[in-house]
Image (cartoon, helix red, strand yellow):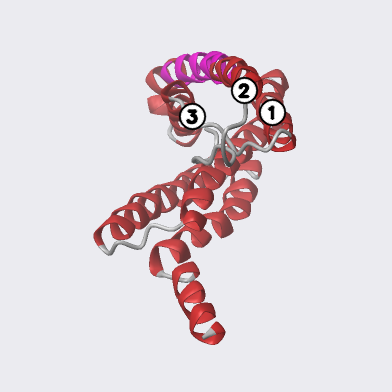
């Protein structure tokens, strides 16, 4: 019986949608190296492949009813890693200031601390907030726009202002969402415990 259960767990972990999510994670260092070396066009190709695989794994997971907790954790983790890689690669080349890197990374460290505090009180992560999704969307598409201007200078007049607008707005919303999570975390901690801890999706 235990063997059969392990087989089911293994099948759910290594289904095609999850394998596509793992592929996205494996491409992160490739993306970072290409970006740091100034190979912006190839970095955009890797990012496009990753974005397509992100759409495909979500489509297949819903179509084949293979949505798993692992997949729900891998997708936002991959998004964050690509954002971090893009920020670090562009900052390394002095194309974006390091203070933007610190703002984005600092916010996620802040949320990590909130998660530890919630766990100590017996609660799981808070539900994903739409504000956090919008912030992640802004950052995820701002950085490729900045890269686009580097890869194709003829597009720089358009892609750079758009990219910076999304980047600054996304950084602001990123911290705004973090403050909303902090307020909600404090509210949850003060609630009387009437059952098992809150269980939800990963923080965005």
Instruction: Tell me residue 49's x, y (percent).
Output: 41, 53
Residue at numbered disc 2: 185
Q: What secondary structure is the magenta-colored segment mainly?
A: helix
Q: Secondary structure at mark 2?
A: helix
The picture quadrant where one finds residue 83 is: top right
Instruction: Tell me residue 20's x, y (percent).
Output: 44, 62
Label 2 packing within 10 angstroms: few (<14), some (14-19), many (20+): some
Work out whether residue 42 can be spotted: no
Give me the residue at 40% from left, 47% from top: 51
- Sequence-first tag of 2 and 1: 1
Mark 3 and mark 1: span between their CA atoms? Answer: 18 Å
**Residue 120 belongs to magenta span:** no
Front-most of residues 93 and 75:
75
Mark 2 and mark 1: span between their CA atoms? Answer: 7 Å
Give me the residue at 64% from left, 25% from top: 104
Which portion, as a residue range, is magenta?
A: 162-176
- Numbered disc in front, either 3 or 1: 1
Mark number for residue 164? none
Q: Secondary structure at mark 3?
A: helix
Give me the residue at 68% from left, 38% from top: 122
Callout 2–callout 1 Cβ contact below 8 Å = yes
| Relative vertical location of residue 88 with respect to residue 182 in this rendering, above or below | below
Front-most of residues 185 and 141:
185
Q: Secondary structure at mark 1?
A: helix
Front-most of residues 160 and 2:
2
Residue at numbered disc 3: 136
Instruction: Tell me residue 16's x, y (percent).
Output: 39, 68
């Amino acid at each position: 019986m235990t063997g059969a259960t392990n087989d089911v767990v293994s099948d759910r972990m290594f289904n095609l949608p999850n394998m596509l999510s793992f592929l996205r994670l494996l491409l992160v260092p490739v993306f970072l190296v290409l970006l740091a070396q100034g190979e912006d066009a190839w970095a955009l190709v890797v990012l496009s492949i990753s974005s397509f695989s992100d759409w495909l794994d979500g489509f297949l997971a819903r179509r084949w009813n293979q949505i798993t907790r692992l997949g729900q954790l891998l997708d936002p983790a991959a998004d964050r890693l690509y954002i971090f890689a893009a920020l670090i690669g562009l900052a390394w080349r002095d194309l974006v200031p390091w203070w933007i890197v610190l703002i984005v990374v600092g916010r996620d460290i802040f949320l990590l601390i909130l998660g530890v505090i919630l766990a100590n009180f017996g609660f799981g992560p808070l539900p994903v907030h739409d504000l956090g999704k919008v912030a992640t969307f802004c950052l995820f598409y701002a950085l490729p726009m900045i890269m686009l201007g580097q890869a194709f200078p003829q597009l720089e007049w358009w892609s750079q202002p758009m990219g910076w607008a999304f980047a600054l707005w996304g950084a602001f919303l990123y911290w705004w969402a973090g403050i909303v999570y902090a307020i909600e975390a404090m509210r949850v901690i003060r609630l009387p415990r009437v059952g098992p801890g809150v269980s939800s999706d990963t923080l965005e």
